[in-house]
Image: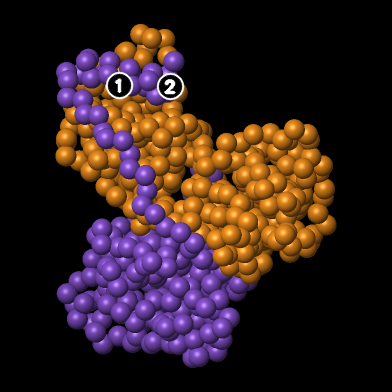
Chain colours: A purple, B orange
Amino acid sequence: MRIVVLVKPVPDATGQERLRPDGRLDRSAAPPVLNGSDEYTLEAALRLVDAHGGDVTLVAMAPAEARDALRKGLAMGAARAVLVSDDLLAGSCALSTMQVLAAVLRTIEFDLVLAGADSADGGGGVVGAGIAALLDLPLISGAAAIDAAGEGAIHVRRIVGTGEETVEATLPVLVVGTQLLGEPRYPTLKGIMGARAKEMAVRTLADLGLDGAAVGGGSATTVVVAQRPPAARAAVRFVREAPHVAAREIVDFLVERRAVR
Amino acid sequence: MSGAVWAVAELGGDGLPTRLSLEAATAARTLAAAGGTSSAAVVAAVDPDAAAAALAAYVARVIVVRLPAEAAGSTVAAAAAAAAAAAAEDPGVLLLGATPDGREAAGILAARLGRGVLGNATGLAWGDGDDGVPAGPRVEMSVLGGRALTTSAFADGRGIVTLRPGVVTAAPAEGIGTVDVAAVAVPAPTAVRVIGRADAATRSASIEEATIVVAGGRGMGGPDGVALLTELAAALGGAVAATRAAVDAGWLPFAVQVGQTGKTVRPALYVAIGVSGAIQHRVGMQDAETIIAINRDPDAPLAEHADLYVVGDLFEVVPAVVAALRARGT
């Protein structure tokens, strides 16, 4: 199975992340790492390839400094990476991101595309579904398990509002995953060494035949008009009494806050 | 004037709009009134009549799309249908709930309509353009794990917003709206077939809609702790939730996980027991109005984000709280 895993390099959540004065994310403030949600889908892709053959291609849109984050995915076992990187893409909105990633996917032959549920930085959780719509690919979200189902089909167990359901889908299809796909593997030393020799193709908007005036930061559909720190929560009230005294304090507090009558 | 404001409804297992959908419908009505435009709610389902009737109490107009029977349960088909209805009328703003299905629909609408998305709104108002950006929604969002609040707008005043629960209070309109059936063709999904279903063992209240959420973490230690959590939730009339650690341990289902890879809640009261409060958990609950934590570790990160922090053994404190609540008859 030829699998594309969409990955997003995001600022490492170390507490150093910040916004620039114009409201854009300052991507120089914290080193980029692979987005957590995308590591689950990558793990699912690698398990499918381990069991049924094929290979995994990582696709990302990010500044050139994100190469190291993609190397981790290669070290985990992906065969190659395609990084779309262009100065004109800085400040891209969600719509632009889905349009650019859809354009990359049009240049790649695949059976299955996997996307994470959301990103740790933007967090809108809309890009995977939008790409499926742009490419007219069938979409399966909330995936908890993915397995091959004979030639050209997969079974996906997915989380839905009422519980779970299992679907059978004819490939190609785009699947949005959850953490239930499985704990991501750690790269082995051999994997880390091998990743250095793997192909990392860097593409610009021009390479993809995209107009820098139609996508990217210059045509962003959304703008940040103001930013401020959140209102501080009132100081915490600590309770260190014996259990029955603490329980009474909790109940009094609930009454004070009108949570119970 | 940038076009009408629509709410795109999400239905619960009972076929009725979720509370968050009613909040979105209320927001559509108030936003439209502020912007001097009209509001509507769109509902796409195999059997949309009951939902349409419920929504008509909140907006002046409900747009119904009837899906073919084969599309039953397909959120993708419902979103595609809503997109077709929107493409026909070109509303300026579309509001959805920031739930898994709402985000999926927002992505499909964005792609099909070529619109921008502002996700996970924690505040919503109409801006008349005196900030230098065209008139339209002004959307407040909590970013960088809650360390900054931003106010954003659409560059041309038109776009899609997903709303966190509890940002708006659902309130019916004065009159009852009309119900129109949209004549859009909806192809049934053919590439994806449902071959099995397993309904959740207990149909617990959605944690996103609950006004009281009682969450347990690693400190629960196992099934005994979960039993205490469940008892406390019952005594408070709240919904049971979990941290990722408690879900990974197999104690509670993923559907009730709060945090980065789970759900975001904004209840009036959040009670955390045995929860350390790692940033990945806090992003899912830090906007709760009141936060009470019971934990053995006085230095856990949640101590800086709670209103009341009880340092103690949850196996002693929680039963005492349950007993005290029962003694009051609550």
Q: Amino acid at mark 2?
A: Arg
SS type, badge 2: loop
Q: Which tag is nearer the camera, tag 2 or tag 1?
A: 2
Rendering quarter of residue A54: bottom left
SS type, badge 1: helix
Q: Chain of mark 2?
A: A
Q: Residue at x 33, y 71 (%)?
A: A27
Q: Residue at x 37, y 20 (%)?
A: A256
Say the numbered circle drawn on residue A258: 2
Q: Is residue A162 left or right of residue A23?
A: right
- Observer able to see residue A103: yes
Question: In the rendering, at what x and y percent does residue A102 appear?
Answer: 54, 76
The quadrant in which the N terminus of chain A is found is bottom left
Q: Is residue A147 left or right of residue B126?
A: left
Q: Chain of mark 1?
A: A
Packing grade of label 2 (10 A; few <14, some 14-19, many >=20) is few
Say the numbered circle drawn on residue A250: 1
Question: In the rendering, at what x and y percent does residue B39 appear?
Answer: 73, 49
Q: Does B99 sit above or below residue A152?
A: above
Q: Does B1 sit above or below residue A106?
A: above
Q: Does A100 sit above or below residue A156?
A: below
Q: Is residue B120 left or right of residue A43?
A: right
State the residue in front, A17 or B312: A17
Give the alpha-carbon distance from disc 2 to disc 1, as whole Å: 12 Å
